[in-house]
Amino acid sequence: MESHPTLPANLPPRFDARRLAANLDALGRVNRALARRLAWPCGSDHVGFGPDGALVLHWRRTPLRIDLEGPRELPAPRRPAGDATSPGWLFGLGQGEPIEAALASDPTRTWIAWERDPWLLRLTLARLDLTDAIRSGRLQFALGTDLFQGRATDGPIHVHPTLGQVYGRELRLLEAGAGSADVLLAEGGLFVDQLGAALARRGHSVFTVDLERLSLEELSHGVRESGARKLFAINYTHGLAEFAAEAGLELFVWEIDPSLDELRPLAGSSERTRIFTYRAAHVAEFRASGFEHVQHLPLAADTELRQPVALDGADKQRYGVPLAFVGSSMVAEAGQYRAAFLDLCAAVRGESSRAAEATRLDALLERQRARPTSYQLVEWIERIYGDVLEAARAAAPGSNPIRLLADVAAADKRLVLVGALGSRGIHVWGDSGWDLLGEFGVHYRGPAGHQRELNRIYSGGGVQLDVNRIYQPDIVTMRVFDVLACGGFCLTEHGRELDALFDVGAELDSYRGPEELIAKVDHYLAHPDEARAIAARGLAAVRERHSIDLRLDAMLRAQASALSAA
């Protein structure tokens, strides 16, 4: 008998380790390889339970309820059921309700229950007694890249109503009858979907892998079964290049976000890794860590997703504001990072020094706050807290405590610049930290949906403000490209990269400090026709020069050029 995985003690009683073991024993008799894979380690911290015991998937910072409320009926098939002898697919399991409904509603059909997440499949096997259905062959399981094992796909496909959106790329592969994937795409933030869509538009079949939560064994299995030869990732994580080299994958990384950690030296060759970074200054950092193929690649817009919207009625009333900003206040993160840095100080200089260090640190942050467009905090922190930095880096290689405080300064800058426009009636979409500026006349409008609602906000007319993070004035933010792609007029901070990518004053406009920001806002609020003409040229510029598809083409050309030169 195979050893069975254990379950955490804090799971609700409907999940039973003995039931899991019995199901795995039954599975082991018909599919020993899958039973063994389900014993491999896997992450579980992304799945929790609500106050009512509901199963909740934390997906990209959004909690999604994935157990099915009410009557457990089988979701309508994506296509007609067809021949009763064709196996039916249950796509996404949650905690197993689709299996219950399928076995009850169509007891003569063979069902293939597919799930991308091994932890959710474990929970299903811990909740339901499926031993008879497994032994008889009426119920077969498929995990991850088992999607490509040649099973018939002409039967009905019933999609979990919530997980269908999470597993959208895999659903398209199943419906197309794809027998393999030529590209693996690392799970991550919102821009992952946009890169995945661009790859699909270029004719690639794309399968998602969760590099953080799957075991190395399951990842290696997935590479073999998928047939993929390329791995794309948004942002670099330590060990990714080594994994890709071991798996025989060409790795493409597009760095689009700042990181709290420093790069660590590579442990092997990076011949098959290509890094594309949104910051030209990071090229040298990657090369110093051992990466051979590194180049600067600016951010871009998904011009299929980001498009102008004609507003009318309630939409025009809600989104047609004269001055808007969309983005995080970073207030919550700033508080956490400040506290974390003071913890480091206390560990090095003694707990009794905490109050004095808090006063000293806040004085430095106040000095930086008075200079919202000139970042000097690094120099001050290195001079005053050298011992703290040295101790922290020795204890946790790759960590950089200065980057904690960089985001504190970034939050301060946003509050200062947005708050300065309260008298101009600015409307802000983002987190609740913006409530702090209500007394200054800032209208907080709540969170902005990252999909279609952003298009409505950016298409709303007036002035769309961009505020960069104080420590990266040398980039053009994603917000700029997205605003222009929606036909909005963008007012952003001036910088060298802005001049290189756009005709400033003709396709968008810029400011160099708080005084010029206020003056430019006043000018364009008084001259809306001029702003609209600039916005029209900005829209054309993004579509012609700055789409994600064009950036992807640049990545693939870089690989082709390197191969031809070899």
Image (cartoon, helix red, strand yellow):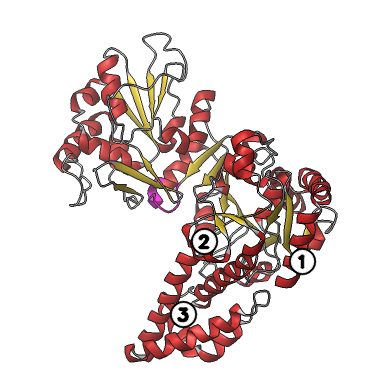
Q: Which residue is drawn at 60% across and 71% down?
A: 416
For the magenta stretch, what is the residue range? Answer: 210-218
Q: Give the CA distance from mark 1 to mark 3.
A: 44 Å
Please tell me whether residue 308 belongs to the stretch shown in magenta: no
Residue placed most toward the observer, 242 or 68: 68
Rendered location of residue 376, percent (x, y): 63, 82
Within 10 Å of the Cα at label 3, are there few (<14), some (14-19), or many (20+) other Cα atoms? some
Evaluate whether residue 485 shows in this view: yes
The tag on residue 434 is: 2
For mark 3, what is the residue? 393
Q: Give the CA distance from mark 1 to mark 2.
A: 23 Å
Main secondary structure along the magenta-highlighted residues: loop
The quarter in which the N terminus is drawn is top left
Residue 514: name its quadrant.
bottom right
Q: Do the residues labelled 1 and 3 touch (CB within 8 Å)?
A: no
The quarter in which the C terminus is drawn is bottom right
Relative to residue 441, is residue 466 drawn left or right?
A: right
* Camera-side mark, 2 or 3: 2
Identified by mark 1, the residue type is: Ala
Mark 2: secondary structure: helix
Rendered location of residue 448, percent (x, y): 54, 48
Q: Do the residues labelled 2 and 3 touch (CB within 8 Å)?
A: no
Q: In this view, does 123 lie above or below 419?
A: above
For mark 1, what is the residue? 519
Mark 3: secondary structure: helix
Identified by mark 2, the residue type is: Trp
